[in-house]
Amino acid sequence: MSYKRSNQQQLLSKLATNDQHGENSPYFDGWKAYDSDPFHPTKNPSGVIQMGLAENQLSFDLIEEWIKKNPRASICTNEGAHDFKDIAIFQDYNGLPEFRNAVANFMGKVRGDRVKFDPDRIVMAGGATGANETIMFCLADPGDAFLVPTPYYPAFNRDLRWRTGVQLLPIPSESSNNFQITIESLQKTYENATKNNIKVKGLILTNPSNPLGTTLSKSTLKSLVKFINSKRIHIVCDEIYAATLFTSPCFTSVGEIIEEVECDKDLIHIVYSLSKDMGLPGFRVGIVYSFNDGVVSCARKMSSFGLVSSQTQHFLATILSDDEFVVKFLEESSRRLGKRHAMFTKGLQKVGITCLRSNAGLFCWMDLRKLLKESSFEGEMELWRVIIKQVKLNVSPGSSFECLEPGWFRVCFANMDDETMGIALERIKIFVGKAEGEAAPPTPVKERRWRKELQLSFSTRMVHHHDNEGGAILPHMKSPHSPMPHSPMVLC
Amino acid sequence: MSYKRSNQQQLLSKLATNDQHGENSPYFDGWKAYDSDPFHPTKNPSGVIQMGLAENQLSFDLIEEWIKKNPRASICTNEGAHDFKDIAIFQDYNGLPEFRNAVANFMGKVRGDRVKFDPDRIVMAGGATGANETIMFCLADPGDAFLVPTPYYPAFNRDLRWRTGVQLLPIPSESSNNFQITIESLQKTYENATKNNIKVKGLILTNPSNPLGTTLSKSTLKSLVKFINSKRIHIVCDEIYAATLFTSPCFTSVGEIIEEVECDKDLIHIVYSLSKDMGLPGFRVGIVYSFNDGVVSCARKMSSFGLVSSQTQHFLATILSDDEFVVKFLEESSRRLGKRHAMFTKGLQKVGITCLRSNAGLFCWMDLRKLLKESSFEGEMELWRVIIKQVKLNVSPGSSFECLEPGWFRVCFANMDDETMGIALERIKIFVGKAEGEAAPPTPVKERRWRKELQLSFSTRMVHHHDNEGGAILPHMKSPHSPMPHSPMVLC
């Protein structure tokens, strides 16, 4: 084996033989756990429920209904087949004009028509994955750095860094401030980098945030744009969750900000996709939208490596240019996401689990700090393994999002039906109830305090005193000295 | 403007500000000429006819007929819409199992079932463009080199080099040897590189060749595999034109060779696509097929940047697993390509133009050396401009294929209907006829000799003596001292 390995190291590239692809993260490991034992309501009811995948599956019926009424939208129907040839051979990297128009129109609608998108700046890429890599290739040379607020999407380590050689420099955040990015932390990270002779080329934001499910306020966005403008560095706004907003405060696109703040538009770039807002990740529609002509030109050349299938372009051009459908879909999808979010968070609240208050996204940022055996990333991983293996839910640990505080988990809630969500909540309840049942009789006063704490917004940072002798917080681990005897999930 | 340029150079990456993307080649310029004045039989009958695009448009009716009979193949029909959700969310980079099975089956059928392809080695990429880049990222570090026989596909300079930083080292070939690759020229190029401390990582072949339209003999392929095996370098066989074979000799895949020659299979890789063989470039189906497990694993991770739309995977899985259709399609497509090739080459022969003898591909390698004002690449470009601007045909000059001898042009023949092909041939005839009409009375003996030469296989290298004082060979240039007074295209 070691001969084989060293042989491969000589034969293959460094990319192929190092592990910079980032797939060794627990984020992906959780997927593997799901893949090896996937839940099915009848065929495998005790399997792992996938809550690690940010999919939007709640509004497919609307699209299916539309399809049945619009057979011409497809080149693979009797009604549309006469277009088959023209579409099947279409490989122009500008994209079908009607596709670019429809996507620009859709991007505007998602942002309440407060931003107008120019179809000539719509550049295709292979999903947001490809779009994010493309923008890095356009903006930075190997070794250059981008600043990125923590916690951030785990696959950024692959998408933005792996083949481009770009570095990501995490900007610290903390729960006491709702994980919000501050100009101070940004400034400090920037200065540290330049002190170490690292060339900082820009700042990456996901807005709405993955994994937080929060949006940036207009004033924060303005400050950030002023900051990057003053440093002459780029801002790349990943807005792929724009239409997942389900409650106030509203979402503000960087496209609105630059109309209000004086800045060099050559520094402003948006990454978009239809994977989340329309729930079509399989269709691989990523968009680079840049206000910089040079980036548009370069990204368009690069789009040759990840063009959207023209069959898919044609279909989307038709459905997304149906304004009546788009408006209805966006409204209904947002409504259903809000309803599901409420169902999930209320279910968690009943068993004493809180999440960061959020207004968008397909996930919650769940606070399980109280359940950690020890307040460390080892403790977080231990809890995560229990959740995967015993509770049989694939959730993603905060460490894989480069979160600096252990005990936070991202849990996706829109990639399943109500029944499966009910089962997931039931499993959590049983897990918690079992823990309660096995627990020592609670001390009423302390319990009340604990429950109150759990119901508080996480904005009050909670300090945990763990049992250094191994006080157990999980059902399979027994200890008479748990520091949190009153937690419903604690055994003692 | 210069401020703007220098500003962009500071802001953007080297990739975005240099011109290594290769799009400044006349190969792409010809497309632009077509785009600005495209031929249409009724709307723009004097426009440029596109003969620079290697598309296979001759058998779409077969696919359309199949579609109408198989509405379930699409998720956008009444019959197939119930699969919409499952397919639209499918984003696994392994691909739909039925897609991989169908593609493996199709690749076998294209090769007469002489090679069996393992579906688990089928890795998706964004077209052959993406597949070629992916394999470079897997095999070579920036600065490493691949050897590539000339003439070669112009966009290799973008696909293989641009973002990977890999060098391409051309292997010389000459018309006297039908542009065949020889072990001697390969050996010499390899040795020159190593002498110059360039790390050679492999050899790239297109088989069938683009632009030659020829296939490599089994014995040549065996020698090449033995060579790369002895040097411990890779061979990447781009076999995207495998099913365009329309006459003998037959096509041999490297997949057959490695069963007959002792070699390390870790060095063997195939690039495939459905753009040419099925005529579906818009669908962006590129395949990396490697016999090296490390490459399969790495390429699969990279496929995240260029997954095939799951809508398209689903459709192709259905049509390509219909063996009866596949066999019929492959036979009929080959027959139609052969017929068109014969129509085109016979039409050229009538006006005294020969092409390299070929048995595959969607193009001919046309010999216009006799028509060069001077035997140089400047002369070639001058002739090319006349063909684009006056004859109004977009053909591609040999220089853009890194051909070392001026006067060869690639002309595509399968991306138009019979009527348009007739018009293209008519334009050539008129161009030639006009030249003849304006020409001085021919000397019969010499003319006969000239015609005989033109009808010879190009394997007899023809030496041209041009008028150094500016003897004209083109209708718009008059000279009384043409060295080729008997050419039908020569004015004197």
Image (spheres, coloured by chain):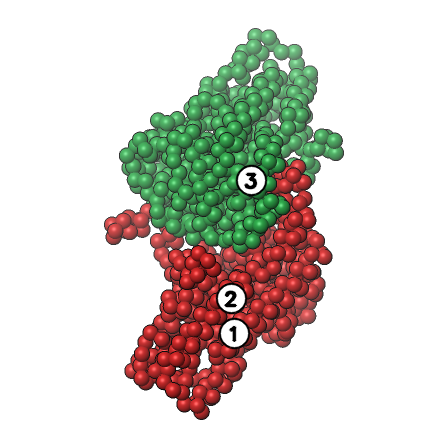
Chain colours: A red, B green
Return the residue found at the far right: B43
What residue is rendered at 73% in x and 33% in y? B44
Residue nearest the observer in this picture, B36 or A131: A131
Residue nearest the observer in this picture, B80 or A184: B80
Alpha carbons under labels 2 and 3: distance apart: 41 Å
For the question of whether residue B84 can be seen, the reply is: yes
| Element type where label 1 sits in the image | helix
Alpha carbons under labels 3 and 1: distance apart: 49 Å
Q: Residues within 10 Å of mark 2 (few under 14, many from 20)?
A: many
Asked if disc 2 and disc 1 are in contact, CB closer than 8 Å, the reply is yes
Q: Which residue is denoted by mark 2 in the rendering?
A: A421
Q: In this rendering, is residue B201 above or below B443?
A: below
| Element type where label 3 sits in the image | helix
Picture quarter with the N terminus of chain B: bottom right
Asked if disc 3 and disc 1 are in contact, CB closer than 8 Å, the reply is no
Chain assignment, label 2? A
- Nearest to N terminus: mark 2 or mark 1: 1
Q: Amino acid at mark 1?
A: Gly
Q: Which residue is denoted by mark 1 in the rendering?
A: A347
Residue B281: assigned label: 3
Asked if disc 2 and disc 3 are in contact, CB closer than 8 Å, the reply is no
Q: In this rendering, is residue A47 above or below B306?
A: below
